[in-house]
Structures are given as structure tokens and as C-alpha cells.
Image: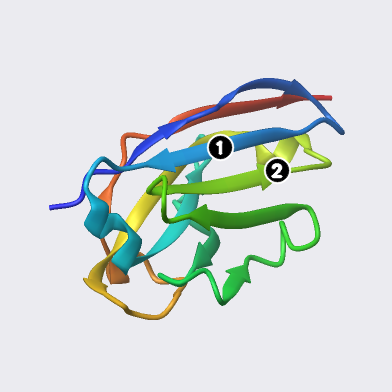
Amino acid sequence: QVQPVESGGGWMQAGGSLRLSCAASRRTFSSYAVGWFRQAPGKEREFVAAITWSGGRTIYADSVKGRFTISRDNVKNTVYLQMNSLRPEDTAVYYCAAAAQTYGPATTRLADFGSWGQGTQVTVSS
């Protein structure tokens, strides 16, 4: 089992930036597609961004496209989510998850991910 751990959350004024990190100690983490999801109070968990095992392809939710960037450093076994131009509606708990199978595609479906972190809180004030 690959166990991701998120970090980098916190408070930010609207228009500011934060960078989230998702790290795993096992080197096999680099063989999995990775996704970021978020859940705001009173709402369902929603897809944010995903990246293939190689980092060659990325996908984004329409709500964050052009503002957020997902990337990975497989030498460090770390995936990043750079969040720019933050808005109050970005406030949520952000979760990192590894795909259920190695070398799979980047997807938007919750069911395609099998190893979840505990989440990190992001709060954006207007």
C-alpha cells in the first residue's frame, strides 16, 4: 500500500498563492497516476487535477484550469499542486490520492484511486 501525506495548506487572502505537496516514502509512488480532490463544507468531494505516472499528461477541473498546476518530481516521490489566483470558493480540505493500479491513466473518477491521504485545509479569505 502506498500512503500519501499532504502538506502546505493554510490561510491565504484572495488573489494569493499556495503550493501543496503530496509525498510518499515508498519509491513505487512514482509508478502511479496521482490526483488531487477537494471537499468544501456541505459539498461532495470533487476532482481538482490529476497527473500520469510519468508526468507527461495532466487534466484539470474547469473551475481551476489556468490557475492551478499539478506537477511531480519522481526522484523525490512528491506531487505538487501550485494554486495561484486563489478565490474564496477554493476553500476546502484538499486530498491527494494514488491510483489503484500502476501505470494507469490520469482520471477524474474517485473510484479509480485507491490510496488516500488525510487531507490538508486550505482557507481563502475575501
Label 2: state its secondary structure: strand
Total marks drawn? Answer: 2
Check disc 2: other Cα within 10 Å, few if <14, some if 14-19, many if 20+: many
6 over 99 or under it: above or below: above
Residue 64 placement (x, y as % from top left): 71, 57
Tell me the tag on residue 20: 1
Contact between labelled residues 1 and 2, with CB atoms less than 8 Å apart: yes
Q: Nearer the viewer, residue 24 or 114?
A: 24
Image quadrant in which you'd find residue 3: top left
Identify the residue shown where x is 71% and y is 67%. 62
Tell me the tag on residue 66: none
Identify the residue shown where x is 51% and y is 27%. 121
> Residues under labels 2 and 1: Cα distance?
8 Å
Identify the residue shown where x is 50% and y is 67%. 51
Image quadrant in which you'd find residue 59: bottom right
Label 1: state its secondary structure: strand
Quarter placement of the C terminus: top right
Q: Nearer the viewer, residue 71 or 47?
A: 71
Amino acid residing under circle 2: Met
119 displayed left or right of 24: right
In the picture as drawn, the residue positioned furthest to the front comes out as 75
Give the colouring mode of the picture. Answer: rainbow
86 displayed left or right of 95: right
Q: Nearer the viewer, residue 41 or 73?
A: 73
Amino acid residing under circle 1: Leu
Identify the residue shown where x is 37% and y is 48%. 77
Q: Which residue is mark 2?
A: 83
Q: Mark 2 vs mark 1: which is more N-terminal?
A: 1
In the picture as drawn, the residue positioned furthest to the top comes out as 11
